[in-house]
Amino acid sequence: MTETLPYAPAPTSPVLAGVPALQPTRLRLEDLHGSLADPVLGSMTLLNEIAGRYPEAVSFAAGRPYEDFYDLGQLHDHLARFTRHLEEDLGHTPEQSRTALFQYGHTKGLLTDLLVRYLAVDEGIAADPDAVVVTTGCQEAMILLLRALRTDERDVVLAPAPTYVGFLGAARLMEMPVRPVREGTGGMDVDDLVTQIREVRAEGLRPRACYVVPDFANPSGLSMSVADRQRLLEVAAAEGVLVIEDNPYSLFGVGTERPPTLKSLDRHQNVVYIGSFAKTAFPGARVGYIVADQPLDAVTREGGGLLADQLAKLKSFLTLNTSTVSQAIIGGRLLEHHHSMAAATRREAQVYARNLRAVLDSLDHHFPGSRSPVTWNVPGGGMFIVLTLPFEADDAMLEYSASRFGVLWTPMRHFYAGAAGSNQIRLSFSVLDPERIRLGIARLASLVHTQITQK
Amino acid sequence: MTETLPYAPAPTSPVLAGVPALQPTRLRLEDLHGSLADPVLGSMTLLNEIAGRYPEAVSFAAGRPYEDFYDLGQLHDHLARFTRHLEEDLGHTPEQSRTALFQYGHTKGLLTDLLVRYLAVDEGIAADPDAVVVTTGCQEAMILLLRALRTDERDVVLAPAPTYVGFLGAARLMEMPVRPVREGTGGMDVDDLVTQIREVRAEGLRPRACYVVPDFANPSGLSMSVADRQRLLEVAAAEGVLVIEDNPYSLFGVGTERPPTLKSLDRHQNVVYIGSFAKTAFPGARVGYIVADQPLDAVTREGGGLLADQLAKLKSFLTLNTSTVSQAIIGGRLLEHHHSMAAATRREAQVYARNLRAVLDSLDHHFPGSRSPVTWNVPGGGMFIVLTLPFEADDAMLEYSASRFGVLWTPMRHFYAGAAGSNQIRLSFSVLDPERIRLGIARLASLVHTQITQK
């Protein structure tokens, strides 16, 4: 630093005309990333804002887990249980346990061994421990995958329409276009997937992966048959398209039979499995994971021959690690329930089944008969049901519904990126009890009858 | 779903030739995001891998906080303290506290009120609570800012060379080129910043922001003078370039005088301040934050007129929330120390000052006089010091140093994206004690003398 170049205003600078620029720096929205002007990114904020103004309304809007069984003491118990596991099962010294919980750690996470056992017990998945990456919720899992699979503007991902807004937003952030695939009464339409893959190719684009929630999808509540799962796997392998299986709700079926996960049927290592403990433990923990056992054709300089290794490398620059304390609490919960979140969430599963029944009974009561102006699907479990109304159900109607009838729901158009679903609404029934559900459906019926009468 | 389109193999599919494709799907590295082939992303993994093979070596490599004061009981105490704060100070009912800790929450975080007080007490920053976003470590803060500021391939960010690898990697992930700015003995060279900004503009590119760590930078250990801070602010405001001030080490100065943060001097709202509790609390928490009070020229449909609101919108699709449990533990620590991390880390600051003195004394001892083959800077605090050696200090030399001399360090070239620093090494002294430091420097001296003799 010997050269001295006294600062003089750059001639190109627009600010310099009015010299002591004490105006705050103003940013124009067009100077920020394009996703920020996209309604997809704003939609959840907007819906939360509307909901926030009507705290007394019955809310079928929030896709939150039931919270009455939560107890602050659990956090301490689970944390202590996991620490014991580190020392008793893994042979850590107290100093090593302390380092594991306080310091930077392996990017793939602290929970690998417990996760592998949980995936075997609850999901029938035999996961290679090296293929597992613990993530900051399932949202980071999506971001990592979308970033990894996007090489340039020709890469495209496919997903059923409607689909989870979190996935649409993540794709927008990572600049990966989402090609919609038709959804039938049995979830994603595999025939249409084939059509879309070919159309994408015909346009000179590259279909990289198909995102799907095979069990009780958000928002539709629909599930895929075993036969469709098999066909999806065949199609994906034959077309060289990865399947991203997202599985947050599979433990919450009404019946006792659970269809196999795609990953457990995957003989081609073609499925990337992503999951979340937001519904089986609690959302605040922000713990999810990826199973990505796809081998790479070449090993990079620093080693690691699986897709999971590449995802971990991206994660080390995105969030570095997943909160150790959160991982420990999730680990403690797994340990207390013999690695089974199915065992840990028996009471929650009963609540969701009871609530779904209450929703269906109330709908039958208020909208009886085959000529009802309102129709709905009958999910086999999960947290969501979709209603088709005889009028447009947009954000303005939601505001009207909240202010005049005291009931909140989610306009389905947000899950279609605004392209469809204008007469449909999603009801989420997971945080309510049957009494509130009956009150809410009655209020919804009043809204519907008022609208029909006004027509 | 009435139409049936029986699946037939797509003629374009490469996999279909050998029909029942039970080979695992193999991914080619060139089918993944370009950043994954970049040495910047692999460098930390590689260095950790080398370090992992020499657990007995004295390690000057890891930039980790001192851990002997950590205690598992603190996690429980802090968590309980924060819960009490929610109820006693914020008037939460027990149910509201439970919801705050277990459920999804405000994207900006649970800690806003405590963070604002901490910023005032420790950093002299008067932050608008609406301008604060809690992040999953400072790494997520960088990602959010880089994503927000990147509109197309013309956007460029500036940073001193050498700079923190985490920033270089984040920029690579978000596809934002980093233009290096020269570093002098007083940290970033503001004259060269002006030169670089103009060159960037002359190339038809847009300089959006300049990333800088004004106090005890990683890796150089250098600090900027108050006069340079003032000039940097003038330049940035005049040029319409934001300053991203990253401040992880400022509490760890050897002297008692602390220079003001850029943000506390910022009269133009031109500084975005990012911070981390990794060094003042613990890395495993993964809690950082952004202060982004820049107003937008237009308010988007869902409201929010500050840059922080836009960053929160991006965050809601990246990690959704920051771990509530981690936030609570950091909050508890702030509460126990009257919102002052300076108060909370008095013992750590003494350890770092003591260790820096031990490093300097050992270096003087082994490399005395003005004709020493090894030179170094004398940082005023922090965790890092840079040595210039009379030979190339690359990854192969590191491996040799570890295997033959039992001492680990970091080749500086990784902080220059491989473009410079080939004879320099970074020593990190934060996790050691004086005895290990003396042993490590003696081993380093043996390496140096062996190399000189062989020449």
Image: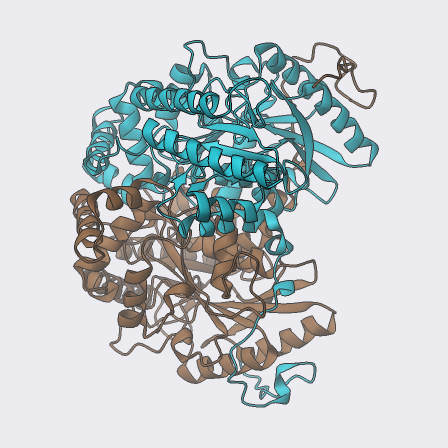
Chain colours: A brown, B cyan
Residue A23 appears at what percent x and percent y?
65, 15
Q: Specify whether B87 is left or right of A143.
A: left
Q: Residue at x 78, y 22 (%)?
A: A13
Residue depicted at 30% across the width and 62% down the height: A113
Examine the rendering and report whether any part of residue A165 can be seen: no
Query: Residue at position x 53%, y 35% from top?
Result: B448
Question: Where is residue B203 shown, x and y percent of the image?
Answer: 82, 36
Question: In this orientation, which residue lies closer to the viewer: A319 or B371?
Answer: B371
Residue B32 occupies quadrant: bottom right
The relative height of residue B1 versus residue B29 in the rendered view (above or below) is below
Q: Is residue A255 left or right of residue B371?
A: left
Residue B31: tell me if it is visible. yes
The residue located at (37%, 38%) in the rendering is B283
Numbered-mark total: 0
Query: Is residue B141 depicted above or below B115 in this figure?
Result: below
In the image shown, does A281 or A215 lie closer to the viewer? A281
Image location (x, y in percent) of residue A254: 27, 71
